[in-house]
């Protein structure tokens, strides 16, 4: 784990929070990617707003601390501006599947070449425990004192149906596997999505439930239908890569091998082109 990824910021996550494991997995993944030729200068990050987003302060990586529900749209903008970057977007479940849902669906649909890591704790944690889009039916919190009357979204099914080309589920209790998922997702060209089961020990402590139900996939399902079937399982919680296909990313479809930053014409050249269009050359 590279020591220089540590920042000066004081960590304010609750002791035992699942976010620590995500941060450790990311640091290890960045170290591994460095060994494979993807240096830190080629990785940029975005975060929404929430407990998950504090990871932005704790990682010495460049990027943009954005708005609630906008981490993945900012990530797409960064990738469009400089397709040589690998962009990793840290989202909360409220962030990704509440306020930012449309951005998530369209990022997957257009196969934007970004990696989205959802810290899925099934709760709005930073705002002290309100029901979120992935909260279980019956979940009790300040906004649902008598229990949640809605069924949760299934994030994997949503992303598979929307067209994501890499869909995975990780668990903070399986650090080595989570690290490998993050490496594979960042190496994937196209929209890669990892739903990380991340208990909030303070507002939705699901450690016991996940320790009993998470089961590693032995292989990646062969077809989209098989991936959907695995994602819909309720008896166990499979973890691993559910789906991975090759398809041109949005940026490659737009630019080919070009890069609008590197290929940007100099001022005089741009001026000459404008004058030629206006017929004033
Ligand atoms: C545009 C906007 N809407 C709402 C909020 C209030 N807000 C801040 S964090 C949060 C919920 C965070 O939940 P989640 O995205 O699941 O992150 P977690 O805290 O659980 O990691 C909300 C509603 C905000 N800051 N900005
Ligand atoms: S409130 Fe929950 S998600 Fe937020 S830091 Fe504490 S344990 Fe973690
Ligand atoms: Mg949350």
Image (cartoon, helix red, strand yellow):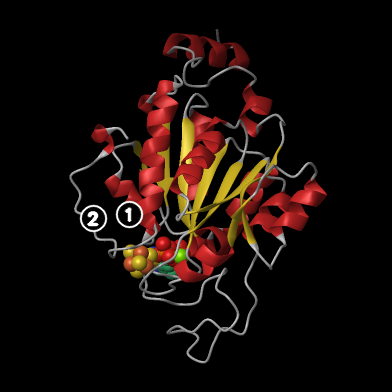
Q: Is residue 85 visible?
A: yes
Residue 172 placement (x, y as % from top left): 45, 54
Mark 1 C-beta closer than 8 Å to ligand 2: yes
Which residue sits furthest bottom? 146
Q: Is residue 246 above or below residue 138?
A: above
Residue 278 placement (x, y as % from top left): 60, 17
Q: Is residue 130 above or below residue 268?
A: below
Question: Which badge, 2 or 1, is on the more N-terminal residue?
Answer: 2
State how far apart marks 2 and 1 are (Cα).
8 Å
The label nearer to you, 2 versus 1, is: 2
Residue 84 placement (x, y as % from top left): 50, 23
Front residue of 102 and 117? 117
Q: Is residue 2 above or below residue 167?
A: above
Residue 117 placement (x, y as % from top left): 50, 48
State the image quarter where residue 232 is shown.
Answer: bottom right
- Badge 2 crowding class, 10 Å Cα cut-off, few under 14, some 14 to 19, many 20 or more, is few
Q: Which residue is mark 2?
A: 11
Count of numbered marks: 2
Quarter of the image that includes the C terminus = top right
Q: Quick check: 138 left or right of 45?
A: right
Which type of secondary structure does the marked residue at label 2 adopt?
loop
Quarter of the image that includes the N terminus = top left
Q: Residue at x 50, y 76 (%)?
A: 131
Which numbered marker is on residue 54?
A: 1
Front residue of 71 and 196? 196
Front residue of 148 and 162? 148
């Amino acid at each position: 784990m590279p020591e220089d990824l540590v920042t000066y910021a004081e960590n304010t996550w609750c002791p035992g929070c699942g976010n620590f494991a995500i941060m450790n997995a990311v640091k290890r993944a960045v170290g591994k990617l460095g060994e494979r030729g993807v240096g830190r200068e080629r990785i940029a990050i975005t975060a929404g707003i929430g407990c998950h987003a504090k990871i932005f302060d704790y990682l010495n990586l460049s990027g943009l601390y954005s708005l609630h529900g906008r981490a993945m749209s900012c990530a797409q903008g960064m990738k469009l501006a400089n397709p040589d970057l690998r962009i990793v977007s840290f989202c909360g479940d409220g962030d990704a599947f509440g306020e930012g849902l449309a951005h998530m669906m369209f990022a997957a649909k257009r196969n934007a070449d970004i990696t989205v890591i959802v810290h899925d704790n099934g709760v709005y944690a930073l705002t002290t425990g309100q029901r979120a889009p992935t909260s279980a039916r019956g979940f009790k919190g300040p906004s649902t004192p008598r229990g949640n009357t809605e069924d949760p979204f299934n994030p994997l099914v949503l992303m598979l149906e929307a067209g994501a080309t890499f869909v995975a589920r990780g668990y903070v209790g399986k650090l080595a596997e989570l690290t490998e998922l993050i490496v594979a997702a960042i190496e994937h060209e196209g929209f890669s999505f990892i739903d990380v089961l991340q208990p909030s020990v303070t507002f939705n402590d699901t450690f016991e439930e996940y320790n009993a139900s998470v089961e590693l996939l032995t292989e990646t399902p062969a077809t989209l239908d098989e991936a959907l079937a695995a994602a819909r399982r309720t008896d166990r919680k499979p973890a691993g890569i559910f789906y991975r296909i090759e398809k041109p990313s949005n940026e490659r479809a737009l630019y080919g091998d070009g890069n609008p930053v590197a290929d940007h014409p100099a001022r005089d050249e741009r001026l000459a082109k404008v004058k030629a269009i206006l017929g004033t050359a």
